[in-house]
Image: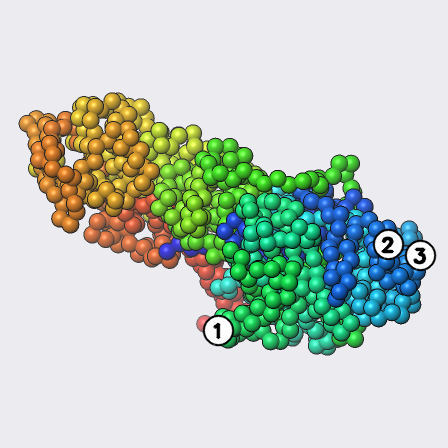
Amino acid sequence: MVSFEPILKDKYEVIVIGAGIGGLCAAALLAREGLEVLVIEQSVQPGGCYTSFRIDDFTFDAAASILHGFGKVGFHAIRTVFDSGSQQVELIPRDIVYRLFLGDQRIDFHRDRHSFTAELGALYPQQAGSIFSFMSELDHIYQGVLECGGPPRPRNDESPGQRLGLFARHPFSVMRLSRFQKISAAQVLARHVDDPSVRSFFEADLIYNTGYPMDQLSAPHAALTIIDRHVGGTHHAIGSSQQIPDRLEKMIVEKGGRVLYRMPVERVLVEDGQAFGVVLPGDRVVLAEAVVADIGVRDLYERLVGRSVLRPETTQWLDLLEPSPGVMAIYLGIPETGIPEDFHPSTVLVDDPQREPSRFISISVPSLSDPYLSPEGYHTLSIHAVTDADIWPSAGGPEYGSEEYEDLKLSEGGRVLERVEEYFPGLTQDFVVMRVATPATFERYLLRENGQLAGPRVRGMTVPASLPGSVTEIRGLFLAGDSTMFGRGASLVAASGINCAFAVMRCLGVRTYHLVEPRESFVMETVPVRPEIIGQDVVDSVSAVQESHRCLRCVDSPCMDGCPGGIDIRNFIKRVSSADFAGAAAMIRENNPLGEVCGLVCPAELLCEAACRRGELDTPIRIGQLEAFTCGVVPGPEGWPQGHRGPRKARVAVIGSGPSGISCAYYLSLLGYNVEVFEQGFEAGGLPSQAIPSSRLDPQVVERELEGALAAGIEFRGNTTLGEDINFESLMREGFVAIFLGTGLGAVRRPEIRGADLPGVIDAVSFLEAARRRVKREMSRRVAVVGDGQLAMDTAVLARDLGADEVFLVTTFNEADMPVAPSRLAAARECGVEMLTGRRVAEIIGHGRVDAIRTVPTLGAAATVEGPHTGALGVGTVILAGERVPSPTLAGYLAGQLKLDEQGRILVGEDTMSTSRKGVFAGGDATGGPELIIEACARGRIAALAIDLYLSEKAAERRYEVMSERSERSVTPEPSADSS
């Protein structure tokens, strides 16, 4: 059983809950200052509303696709974050933000303000002057927003010095914004315009862009929305909006932070008004000096914190929260012939602007400007429609997924498609792929209450001005995202992240700074081209990125289920697609310290690649090649998880330096233990370094992997044999509080047949070890290798490479059932190895040395076709590559110390790898027979987690005993002086 439990430190300086844009920006800026940051995300990828997904070769933005805040001028908080982290992002500028059909009217929202106002004036000629004066006042408010660095922040979010400094620099802007903060956009419009149709126009525009109606939307936010798109412009991210969170994640990882996926937070720990950590599934506690929540404010206060620790006024405020409208979405792949020639990539329909300006249907065809998003000859089409959230079940309710729920999806989806089909005739017959997302879907994957369009509303108050800032009433707990007073949109939630990061720095005593714009920006405006994705071998960074683009990014990640080590294949490939090879390598090594080795020698085509859904379209992703290249190109510290900081904990001994031993030692070191590895030989590595032919695994690969793993603060002691130089008792006397056995299987069992002891009969392990050491072994021109697995295959190929004229591999299996990858079988045949399948060796014939072997058919297997080799086969060397067993010396010692099975293997608990002796754990081949390297690494990792739990419980018991002893001494009366 493989444990996917992450290796986490006991404490981080900052924990960020949620990997939306706000949380990611905060984490990136905090990690940049050298703080230890852990981002915990319940979904499979970062981004929140700015995520994307794939259906076959179609890529869809889950929610947001229009990006604000990346312009050279204007309110460009998110551009500032990218430039501060020297992180490149590629964008497509938009000349027209979107096209609005308001009943029978149509208007294009041009980037150029004069073009927009001219078109708007032509639409409402009698109100043109009034509209111009309204926009002039919004421009006046907007300039104040720019000068103040964003909408007015609550007093708790700024120090007195910051407030005084801002007022000294921009007194009129500060006063102007404070006056408009509690005024709604509708009130400002009413000063200039009294035409209901104009009101409906701005109502539709603002609710589409902010999620709030005009009578609830605060005036500064309305000004930002309406004016900034003409100043800074809008963009589309090349390759989907997923590029934005992916690059922010890269910034975090590059600065030593960590992003954890598929991990819900169950509780925020609060004591005496101070947040000090979080609780993860399984009651796992991770401590922190500060906690940032990039989730819904109601979800935070009611589910993670609890109303009992809140002030009465806060609970009353919570009762005033109302959800924004819900949204459903339909994602389609359609032929390019189905798109009208003049159709705009972002189009919004409002059918009844007078009575229901808030009910819109948006249609996005981003592949019109970015061909990366769909196969040639097709387009991606995303439809989002406002819906009544109360008709849909909750994601956690019993109705979710029921037959009634599916019927509701069909009826509501059909209603939306019927309206959209007026613009795309034949749409419902022509689509090739389709998915429907309801408010419950968005609630499930994005944790948005009722699948709401924006942050919550506050009854009777303007929003988002009435939502909280970054600083909460609980010390050490901070907010980011669209549930704060910044509101919705990439630039605004980025601003919330910046504001939050600075608040955390002040709390932790870290000096804050100004985000200075560099001379050269890393935000690039460019024109996309369809990438060449041909499914070729991974040989360099270009082919690696091209191969990664073939990944379908399946939400359920079947490839991860097919990996015995539980590597997050989906997300390491996603990082490769962003050319973040260091981050990808670190993610692989969070589960497997021998990533390059496993990528080269693991039978990926039987494991992760066999589960890859890409194979249903053409060929599976070359996961093994990607893993090997990624780890090989980043062997240094930047490609490994952040090591332990601070003093080391207890001493743990690891006996054996094979894959399981190295894995256990490495993860124990990450957990903060003082680890020493004992090895019988002079060099570390076990089977990979001693018995895999160099033609299959370059010794330099093993050396650099071991160097990287042992660099985590692990001591190595070679030429030390368990049972002779050391034993369990001597290790305990040296101060080791736990022991892990990764001793492997160092011998091959000789079959009980006549002639097995003849000269010329050798075992495969010693044969391979001699070849690795370049020690020449006597070998005849005709060789028989006896065995069924990869050890036998490697031995047969090596025998050919060393000069044997003929090599016969005798196996009891049918060829189709052999436990080796088909590619390895084909390679063996190509080099001249002859397979004798479905046979076993009954006798080894010879007088003084081997002359021949006699084989007989295996029951239940189809033997090789009758021929010259079906009876006695003349050979001069027989190499035994069958069942591997412990070395006799080790087996003798362990028999008196631990419980073993009939084959001499150590009996362990499946989930803990604990042996029959307290404090002694074991893994690898010594416990379950010959394993794949990735399986051995996984068992070593499980053991590391089990040892950590064992020692933590032991330490807790000791603390309890000490406290009890102190308590007893404090209540025991002193003996009187005259007592006898």
Q: Residues within 10 Å of mark 3 (few under 14, many from 20)?
A: few
Q: CA distance from mark 2 to mark 3?
A: 31 Å
Q: Residues within 10 Å of mark 1 (few under 14, many from 20)?
A: few
- Position of 600 relative to 180 (above/below): above
Name the quadrant of the C terminus.
Answer: bottom left
Q: Nearer the observer, disc 2 or disc 3? A: 2
Q: Nearer the observer, disc 2 or disc 1? A: 2
Residue type indicated by callout 1: Ser
Dot 1 falls on a residue whose secondary structure is loop
- The answer to whether one can see residue 61 in this image is yes
- Position of 335 relative to 389 (above/below): above
Which of the pair 108/423 is nearer the observer?
423
- The answer to whether one can see residue 259 in this image is no
Place of residue 250 in the rendered image (x, y in percent of width and height, measured from the top left): 61, 45
Residue type indicated by callout 3: Phe
Place of residue 749 in the rendered image (x, y in percent of width and height, measured from the top left): 19, 41
Dot 3 falls on a residue whose secondary structure is helix
Left or right: 548, with 86 as reference point? left
Place of residue 85 in the rendered image (x, y in percent of width and height, measured from the top left): 69, 42
Dot 2 falls on a residue whose secondary structure is helix
- Residue 438, by quadrant, is bottom right
Check residue 164 in the rendering and tell me which mark sits there, or answer none: none
Which of the pair 305/666 is nearer the observer?
305
Which of the pair 504/447 is nearer the observer?
447
Write the residue at 72% across / 45% down: 93
**Is tag 2's residue or tag 3's residue first in the polypeptide sequence?**
2
- Residue behind mark 2: 118
- Residue behind mark 1: 402
Check residue 172 in the rendering and tell me which mark sits there, or answer none: 3
Query: How was the colour assigned to the protein in this rendering?
Result: rainbow
Q: CA distance from mark 2 to mark 1?
A: 51 Å
